[in-house]
Amino acid sequence: MAGDAVRTALLLGPDHPGLGEVALGGLSVEGDGAPTMLGAALSAGWRPKAVPAVEPNEDGALLAVGPAGALLAVADGHNGSAASTAALRALAARAPVLLAHRTGDEAELAAAFAAAAHGAVARPPAPGGSEAGAEGEPRPARTALSLVVVTAAAFAAVGYGDTTAAVVRRGRLHLLDEPSEFLGPTSPADPLAGHPVTRRRRGPGDLLVVVSDGVTDYLGRAFGAAIEAASRAGADGGQPDAARATARSLIARAGAAGAGDNLTAAVLLAARPRRTFGWF
């Protein structure tokens, strides 16, 4: 919890290293009609990682809601969790300011959040240094990161690396970002260089989802169908836990597919109401 008007939920992989363990977080915004729900689920995976890793769980997720809108973010650290944790903590620190007042649109807010994560992770190397450092030193920590800012009218996404943000609209999956360079110490000075902000108007019943590559890699072509099935399973769980149930179901489906990687999902479920108070 941060600030009087903004609520946050932060899940960090190092706090949940056990295989098969699933950590959950959720927030909701009441409106004149069905509430808007945010949920997140995080797991180290069902099986040991297929490739060497510094830590058992290097993923993380952040949810935040305030008068200006909502934020969903998933990070997947490489060479440890330092970069993913730093990026998510920076987003959580900025949320009470950026989401407290309606001072910008969703694209401006997404760019501001991206700048906060960039500022926490991107550190120029020392003169004469290199990304790999001295011989025998480990490569510096980097992170994949996808974030989505949602307002009453639209949503905007920014992505780094191989995490994925998507919207399911009328049963069809639409990706909001593409694979790109990871966020790390040698990232360009411009936070948005090679990482454009994608903006879309909201549609009735839109389901927004942000996942780490463990989910997409192990679900493969079944990713879209798994989101639909997970959302139906989540809806059966009742309010206000439907978003958490959806995220958990998606993680479980990737786990059942044999996931040997960290698994993280953040989702937003909302029916566009006729009249609301607040920002939904």
Image (cartoon, helix red, strand yellow):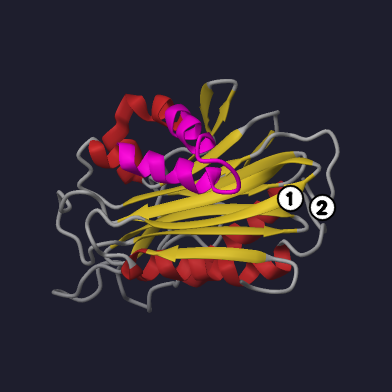
Q: Position of residue 172 (x, y in %)?
A: 53, 21
Span shown in magenta: 228-253
Secondary element at image label 2: loop
Residue 238 drawn in magenta: yes
- Res. 159 mark: none
Residue shown at 53%/45% (left/top)?
Answer: 243
Mark before the other along the chain sequence, 2 or 1? 1
Q: Position of residue 233 (x, y in %)?
A: 45, 33
- Res. 30 mark: 1
The residue beneath circle 2 is 278
The image quadrant where one finds the C terminus is top right
Please name the predominant secondary structure of the magenta segment in the image.
Answer: helix
Tell me the distance, in whole angstroms, between the alpha carbons under discs 2 and 1: 8 Å
- Looking at the image, residue 177 lies above or below residue 73: above
Q: Is residue 35 left or right of residue 85?
A: right
Secondary element at image label 1: strand
The amino acid sitting under disc 2 is: Gly
The amino acid sitting under disc 1 is: Glu
Question: How crowded is the residue under tag 1: few (<14 C-alpha within 10 Å), some, or many (20+)?
Answer: some
Q: Nearer the viewer, mark 2 or mark 1?
A: 1
- Please name whichever residue, 13 or 252, is drawn nearer the observer in this view of the structure: 252
- Looking at the image, residue 280 lies above or below residue 191: above
**To which quarter of the image does residue 132 belong?**
bottom left
Q: Position of residue 272 (x, y in %)?
A: 74, 34
Mark 2–mark 1 CB contact (< 8 Å): yes
